[in-house]
Image: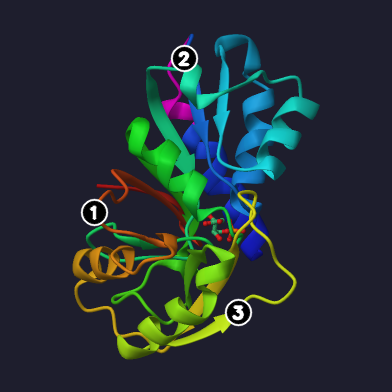
Amino acid sequence: MTQDELKKAAALAALDYIEDGSIVGVGTGSTVNHFIDGLASVRARIRGAVSSSEASSKRLAALGIPVFDLNDIDRIPVYVDGADEIDGSFAMIKGGGGALTREKIVAAVSERFICICDASKRVPTLGHFPLPVEVIPMARSHVTRELARLGGEPRLRAGFVTDNGNLILDVHGLTISDPVDTETRINQIVGVVTNGLFARRGADLLLLAGKAGVERIP
Ligand code: 5RP
C-alpha cells in the first residue's frame, strides 16, 4: 500500500467513532482530507462540523457538510486530526500544514482527540520533524533568538501566512525529551501564538495504519 492509501485507511476507520447527531471536530491535512471525504458519505447522521482551517472548511462546504463557528457550539464529542509525529504517550508534533493554532483550539474544546496516521508518523522521541511555531510578525526576530537559546535552529517558513495572518518558524534540531515542558516553555515566549507540540492535551486514541491494517491504540 502507498502512504496515501494508508492515510485513507486510518481516516476511514475514524468514521466508526462519530456520534449520531453530533458536531464533529475536523483537523487539517492530507490524512484529514480523506476523513472529510468519508464524512460526506455519512453526512445525514451528523449535524455538521467545526473546522480547524480555511482549507478544511472549504472542503467540508463543497461536500455539503455544514460548518459551524466554534463560538456557537458547546459540545464536540470527537476531534479527528492527523499528526507529523506521535510518540508512545500520544504527544504529537503538528502544524506541518500550518494550521496548528486553530487545531489546538478545536482540540481543547473536544472531548476526545482521535489521531489518524500512517505508521511512519509513530516515533520513539519527538523532534526529528521540525517543530512549527506560529508567531506574530513583529515578534519574528525576538522569537527566533529565544528559540535558538532553547537549542533549536528556527527557520522562517518562506512565503507562508497562517489563516490568522501570522508567520511560522520551523524549529530544527530540538531535543524534545519532555514534550510537556518544551510545549510550556515555548508558549512563554512573548510573540508566540502557539507551538505545534500537542503534549499537554495529546491524543486519546490513535488509529495507525500499517501493512497489517489499522491498529486502534490503546
Ligand atoms: C496540519 C497538521 C497535520 O495534521 C499534519 O501536518 C499531518 O499532515 P498530513 O495528514 O498531510 O500528513 O498538523 O497543520
Q: What amino acid type is highlighted by mark number 1? A: Arg
Where is 49 relative to 122, above or below?
above
Q: Position of residue 37 (x, y in %)?
A: 69, 34
Q: How far is disc 1 from disc 2 in space, using C-alphas?
A: 25 Å
SS at mark 3 in the image: strand
Q: Rate crowding at label 2 as few (under 14), some (14 to 19) or many (20 or more) other CA atoms within 10 Å.
A: some
Q: How many neighbours does mark 1 have within 10 angstroms: few (below 14), some (14-19), or many (20 or more)?
A: some
Q: Which residue is mark 2?
A: 22
Q: Amino acid at mark 3?
A: Leu
Ligand 1 in which quarter: bottom right
Q: Measure the alpha-carbon separation of dots 3 and 2.
A: 39 Å
The x, y position of residue 188, in whole percent, is 28, 65
Q: Are marks 1 and 2 in contact (CB under 8 Å)?
A: no
- Residue at 66% from the left image edge and 59% from the top image edge: 4
Mark 3: few/some/many CA within 10 Å (<14, 14-19, 20+): some
Q: Where, quadrant-wise, is the N terminus in this rendering?
A: bottom right
CA separation in Å, label 1 and label 3: 25 Å
Residue 57 position within the rendered picture, expressed as x and y whole percent measured from the top left: 68, 34
Q: Which residue is mark 3?
A: 156
Chain part drawn in magenta: 15-20
Residue 123 visible from this viewpoint: yes
User: x, y (%) of residue 71?
Assistant: 47, 22
Question: Is residue 168 one of those drawn in magenta?
Answer: no
Does 194 appear above or below 151? above
